[in-house]
Image: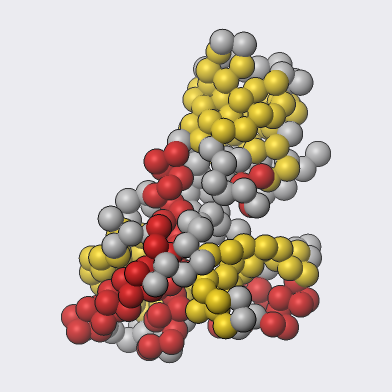
Amino acid sequence: MPTERTYLRDTARRRFETRVDRTLTDPPRVVLDRTCFYPSGGGQPHDTGELRADGRTWRVVDVSGRETVEHEVTGAPLPDEGTAVEGVVDADRRRGHERHHTAQHLLSSVLLAAFDAKTTGNQVYADRARIDCAYPRFDDADLARIEERLNALVDADLPVRWYERDRAAAARDLDPARTRIGLLPDSVTEVRVVEVGDPDDPFDRTACAGTHVASTGAVGTVTVTGRETKGPETERVRFRVD
């Protein structure tokens, strides 16, 4: 059975009740009926935290999978199938991912609008993030301009929303330079869309399965920490939020 992925609609939840669907070994893993733990993917690392049941605690050290989400845990023996458990997501780690991932959306839109630089890759962490984009080279003045624009968007405290959309409709309505919906497997028929700003004229609207803060004001101050050339016509921009 596919895992009910609660983190897609309720990213603010850090504690949840669920049941063990089955367990796996080598390494020890637990599959739950539903989960708030985010699995690694889309440039966002997995959550960590704990599973608790009957006075016992298992530490969640890795989360992977999409349709079926597997939680790698420490502690033996594993809980029995059907056991009611409480999941507790590491709040600080998740919050860091949410803030940096939302900032990455802002940065991708700024780079596209100001420099016609399309994002080609990204990686967020709890304490920093980076974007790769199609551009020859940024100078110090460019980085200062980017940082100023990002913090103006934070100060504007724009709303951030997410919802699911039929893939064909999303491909028709969304900017292909940002969404890259065509790269998704044919089996994906519903696309999760993340919007920043006015619903009638959003600053950013793109397909994304990651977790985000509810408004740009929650991102915090963005500092562009540097850049480096990663190949012909490719720049990497590093940043953090405080």
The answer to whether residue 174 is above or below residue 123 is below
Q: Decide which of 160, 127 is in the foreground and name it.
A: 160
| Residue 131 in sight here | no
Q: Decide which of 16, 28 is in the foreground and name it.
A: 16
Q: Residue furthest left?
A: 140
The answer to whether residue 214 is above or below residue 121 is above
What quarter of the picture does the N terminus occupy?
top right
Residue at position x 62%, y 32% in the image: 16
Spot occupied by residue 26 in the image (x, y as percentages of width and height): 59, 27
The answer to whether residue 202 is above or below residue 184 is below
Spot occupied by residue 15 in the image (x, y as percentages of width and height): 57, 33
Q: Quadrant of residue 37?
A: top right
What quarter of the picture does the C terminus occupy?
bottom left
Residue at position x 53%, y 31% in the image: 88
Spot occupied by residue 101 in the image (x, y as percentages of width and height): 45, 60
Q: Decide which of 78, 33 is in the foreground and name it.
A: 33
Q: Decide which of 194, 123 is in the foreground and name it.
A: 194
Q: Residue furthest right?
A: 1
Spot occupied by residue 232 in the image (x, y as percentages of width and height): 35, 83
Residue at position x 73%, y 43% in the image: 4
Residue at position x 71%, y 76% in the image: 170
